[in-house]
Image: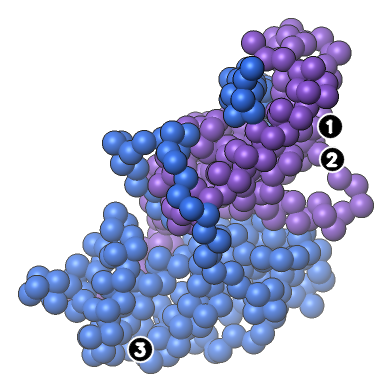
Amino acid sequence: MKSGDDLVRALIEDTQDAHAPRDEDYQRVLTKLRSASASASAANRGRWSVGRSGLGLLAASALVVGVVTIAGQSHLESPPPVAVQAEERTAANESPTPPVEPTTKTVSVEALPSIVSTSVPSAARPVPLPSAVRPAPLPSGAASSSLAEEIRLLRAASDASRASNHAGALSFVEEHERRFPRGFLADERRVQKVLVLCELDRESQARAEARRFTADRPSSPLNARLSSSCAAEEKSGQ
Amino acid sequence: MGNASALVCSIDSSLMTDARLEDHYRQHFAYVWKSARRLGVSEADADDVVQEAFLVARDLLDAKSPADVRSFLFGVVYNVVRRHRRRLKSSPQTTSAIDDLPDASARGPTASTERMEAARLLERLLALLNDEQRAVFVLAEIEHKKLREIGQILGINLNTAASRLRLARARLAEAALRIQAQEGWRTR
């Protein structure tokens, strides 16, 4: 008699293609995707002055979350970079180690920005700051989406750095850190923080942050940015 | 010394164009669709979830430069599905993934009745898992990913991935035996 595990595996084998899409699925979703992408760009063109890519992000995030009433976790967590070691055993053959409760940090709903539906009248919608205007501290609930908010915070930090307002840049980076500890752009934020700390001559702190990042993300292409920062000097001296 | 202001600019300038979005769509549509369905999205809802996943991916794929695009996309789909699930919970009308799998009595040109029945049975079993366990189980048992990869894809540590997989396997094995005893289900 087969064990329960064997029964499940046999079932999986028998149903390998059970969820495969049909040709008409491909075409139908592609049509919808084109339409959504185009309408999002058109809707945002001229209304935002934060650059083409910012538009893309904001448009996509508005589409993603625009009609959502958030319950529970209200931002999409970014999957970390994937680096696969070929010599590893497959999970199917591995002996699971003793159970450990998930340690993933979450952000309380209250601490996250509210999501504004795209159907909200424009008068009630928060107005994004144009890039020419120095970003002020963000009012609570002013975000149109968590993804857009992430980009906006990092952009604000970037603008502040460009204006040599490094303390201001750090405050934006730290705000991102506080509000989106595991956000889509968490890695970019961590690297940006190192660079800002360098600008502030807080080298030991920058090195500590850089060491943590490199340890967590050894294969990240963002490490290249750290190699040309003040945080790299200690590494070469070690 | 690094230039902090350049970092976001470099992210911005590398964001994906629509042409590249379609390129990724052509390459990965089937995978994203299957992943969404395996994670329990009904056929009726798959359009929206897949579309949403590609829109999110458009803005992140280049910025993140993942080494393994498919794995990255699974992570995106997983998060979109979880959000979708929360949306469904607050909606009066819900369609479960099992509802739109072909009925055992249905006839199809490509799938036998037995395979359809097996698909429904698998969906019944997977529906017993929560989202987190289901994602780990799908990656491990259907996509044959290693625990370390699973941890990276889902943003969890290896022990958590192992724990979820163990719990999922135990739950499904028990349920499979129970269904077999009650309904006389057989496999090849």
Disc 2 chain ID: B
- In the rendered image, the quadrant that contains the N terminus of chain A is top right
- On residue B99, which mark appears? 1
Distance of mark 1 from mark 2, alpha carbons?
7 Å
Q: In this rendering, would B2 be left or right of B129?
A: left
- The three-letter code of the residue at mark 1 reads Asp
The residue to which callout 3 is attached is: A166
Mark 1 and mark 2 on one chain: yes
* Label 1: element kind: loop
Mark 3 and mark 1 on one chain: no
Disc 3 chain ID: A
Q: Nearer the viewer, residue B110 or B54?
A: B110
Q: In this rendering, would A99 be left or right of B7?
A: right
- Residue at horizontal 40%, vertical 42%? B68
**Chain letter for blue?**
A
- The three-letter code of the residue at mark 2 reads Thr
- Report if the CB atoms under discs 1 and 2 are less than 8 Å apart: yes
The residue to which callout 2 is attached is: B95
- Pair 2/3: label in front: 2
